[in-house]
Every structure is written in structure tokens, then in C-alpha cells.
Image (spheres, rainbow, N blue to C red):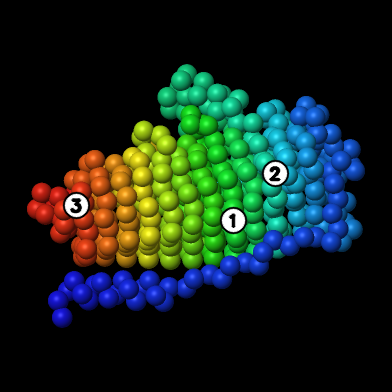
Amino acid sequence: MSPLPLVASTFLVCLTVCAIPSLASPSTTQSVRSSITDFGAVGNGTTLNTEAIQKTIDHLATSGGGAVVIPEGVFLSGAIFLKAGVDLELEKNAVLKGSTNIADYPISKTRIEGHFQPWLPALVNADHVDHLRISGEGTLDGSGKPFWDEFRRRIAADRSTKNLDVPRPRLVFIEYCNDAQVIGLHFKDSGFWNLHVFHCHDCLISGLDISAGASSPSTDGMDIDSSQNITIQNCHISVNDDCICLKGSKGPFAMDDKDSPPVEHIRVSDCRFARGGSVLTVGSEATIVRDVVVEHCTVEPTATRGLSMVRLKLRPDTPQNYSDIHFRDITLSGAGQLISVAPWKQYFDLQGQPSPARSVRDVTISNITGSFGGFGTIQGNTGDVIDNILLENIDVKLTNPAPKIVGVTDFVVKNVKINGTEYGGPTPSTQTTTSP
């Protein structure tokens, strides 16, 4: 048997037998529902309601649990903290609007960008709240513009300014939760990341509409951090950074981080992506990421810069193993790159250590149609292993069809057309073993 059918068969087996997490049960309605207005909240858009909302949460937590209900109106609030047995429901035309006063987000030790440090909490926070439900037809509004403006002011004054030098609140932070569900809401103008899920298991994210201004810095749609069995479906994302980002730890000792287990068993389906850095990014903080499927999605970037479909960041200071990642049944329209596998050196620090090993293995891109910008790049750092890349059943029109493929082994192409012409895979002009 020739090598090509053998490799292709291996990929097909992988696609068939990879564990697919079962969907969590639909969002439930708590038998006890308490409106925040019963505890003094006023929905006029100017009254600060942090205390009233937290009183509602605390009351339910000490009386058997229930759902905190935010009714129609605009309810201004700082950080609130959900507790075991307490859900959050935003009714139609309800807005939970984040305060723009940074003092309303008390600094505490939190997980951010692959480590823990004192920083701002999110507008909505949940820690060890199993079976959590955050749902409804309302809106979480981060009031992000003043935070974005402050970041830009700081970086204009000092180009060495980093993301975390300018505290900005996330919209929702869920950590150490099993069977959490976030369903149906509109996330709007987060000051920083929109939905951050850390060290969680068996979670469902469904029907979200996540948007942030075209010039909003670091407004990732979702950051799935050190979590397993996460299902993301039927979401619309239009932000100014990664639409969905898979994260873990960072640095030369990242594999020793016991708080950061592998990111694995991630399923993304039936989503629409309109603006952002990429549909799915792995990194910049990540160690082991495996068993990821993105399928039945539409990518229609509205910005002229477009967005990448696949982006795998290879960080020179971090041991990384990305494997079993599959994109299939994707429709493209607009600008952007099909794939970007490349070094990411923005903040790396070897801490005096040698550069650790990194690998990308078993990536498939199949059943892709439409029009897009460019093919993209697959090229790692010196010494990176990139192995078993399969392109299959692809028919696309590209404005920049020439790929840059460097140092890849077992690059398999089956039934791929670019601009109406069969693409047979890397040639000596595109494939080289020269290190970057």
C-alpha cells in the first residue's frame, strides 16, 4: 500500500473514534426565582446595583438556591459573585451593564493569561458552582470603551505596555465548575475577554451573540482555559481578537503547572464568525491541546483584514503538544487565511532555560468551500515537529493562493482545488527543510 492511502486511513479512523463529549442537558428553570428589584435594584442605567444584586445572590445561596432574575431595564453593577445553587437569568430587554469605575471591581488573585496574579474580576464571576446556568434573552454590557481608551492612551505613551499592565474587566469568568451552561445571551463591549472558562468540565455554551467594537483591544470571544469536554454551538462572534481561544499555561516550566491540565475534547459547531483574529486560536498560553473539532460553521469576516480560520501559536519558551485538531464543513466568504501555524514571540521569556520541545500533529482541514484571502503559512520555530497534515475535499477561491510550508512531514492532499486548479501539495518552492 502506498503511504498516502495509509496516512489518509489513519486520519479517517481518528475522526471516527475520537471521543465526542455528550451535550449537557438543556438549561433548567429554578423553582425559586428572585428578582433583583425585590432587593432594591433600580434599572435606570445610572444607579449602582452591585450591593442589591449580591444580596439577591446571597439570599438564595443561604435559603436553598434558585435563580437570580434580572428583569427588563438597565441595571448598572460592578463585579458580582455567584454561589453554589444560584443561577443567573436575564429576561428579555434586561441589561446588566458593567460599571466603568475600576473601583467597582475589587482586585484579587485571579487566573489570567496562563498564570495567577492580582487583577480585576469579571462583571459576573462563578467559582466552584457546579451545574451553573447563566441564561436568558438579555444582554451583558461591559461598557468597554473607557477601558479600551485607557489601554490605547497607555500604549501610545509607552510602546512596551503589555496587556496586563492596564486592568480591564472581563464580562464572565467561570472557574472550577462542572456542568456549567451559558445560553442565549448577548455579550456586548467587554472591557477585556468576553467569556473566560477556566478548569471546567462538561460545559455547554450555546446561542450566544458576542460582539465588541472594531477597535476594541483584547476582546476575545471565548477563552477556554485548561478545560475539558466543552461544547460550543450556535454562537455568533464579532470581536477584535481571537473568536475562540484555547489556553493553558506558559513558560519553560509550564508542564509542571498542576492547575493547568490539558485542553481536550472541544467541540465547536454551527457557529458564525464575522470579525476577529481567528476562528480558533491555540495559544499563546498553551501546553497540551488535543481532540478539537470545529465543524458546520460559516466564516464571513466583515473587516478588510479578514480573520484566520486556523491559528496555532508556537511559543519558543513553552513546551507544547497540539494534536488531533480537525476543521470540517466550513463555508468561507471574505478575507483572511485558511491556516496559520507560526512562531509567537510577543512576550516569551526562556528564563535562562533552553527552548523546550513543541509539536503539531494530526491536523485535518476538510470539506471547505467558498472564497477567502490567502492559503497561509505552516512554519514552526527551529526544532519544532509538524507532522501529519491532511487537506481533503477543498474547493476555494483565494486572492493569494501561494502557501508557505516549511519543515512539515507527511503533508497529505486529497481532492483539493484552489481557484479551479487541482492543488497537489507542496513543491520545492513552497516546501523546504530550512529552519526559520
Q: Which of 122 and 68 is in front in this view?
A: 68
Mark nearer the N terminus (1 vs 3): 1
Mark 2 Cα-neighbour bin, 10 Å: few <14, some 14–19, many ≥20 = many
> x, y percentage for residue 331?
37, 52
Say what amino acid the circle numbered 1 marks. Ser
Say what amino acid the circle numbered 3 marks. Gly
Question: For the point 25% across and 45% down, which residue is it?
Answer: 398
> x, y percentage for residue 231?
54, 61
Is mark 1 in CB contact (under 8 Å) with mark 3? no
Residue that numbered label 2 is attached to = 138
Residue that numbered label 1 is attached to = 206
Judge left or right: residue 196 versus residue 434. right
Count of numbered labels shown in the rendering = 3
Judge left or right: residue 62 versus residue 92. right
Question: Is disc 1 placed on a helix, strand or loop?
Answer: strand
Q: In this view, does 92 lie above or below 201?
A: above
Question: Is disc 2 placed on a helix, strand or loop?
Answer: loop
Q: Quadrant of the N terminus?
A: bottom left
Question: For the point 55% across and 61% down, which residue is it?
Answer: 230
Alpha carbon distance from label 1 to label 3: 36 Å
Residue 433 figure quarter: bottom left
Question: For the point 70% across and 27% down, which residue is it?
Answer: 101
Mark nearer the N terminus (2 vs 1): 2
Residue that numbered label 3 is attached to = 420
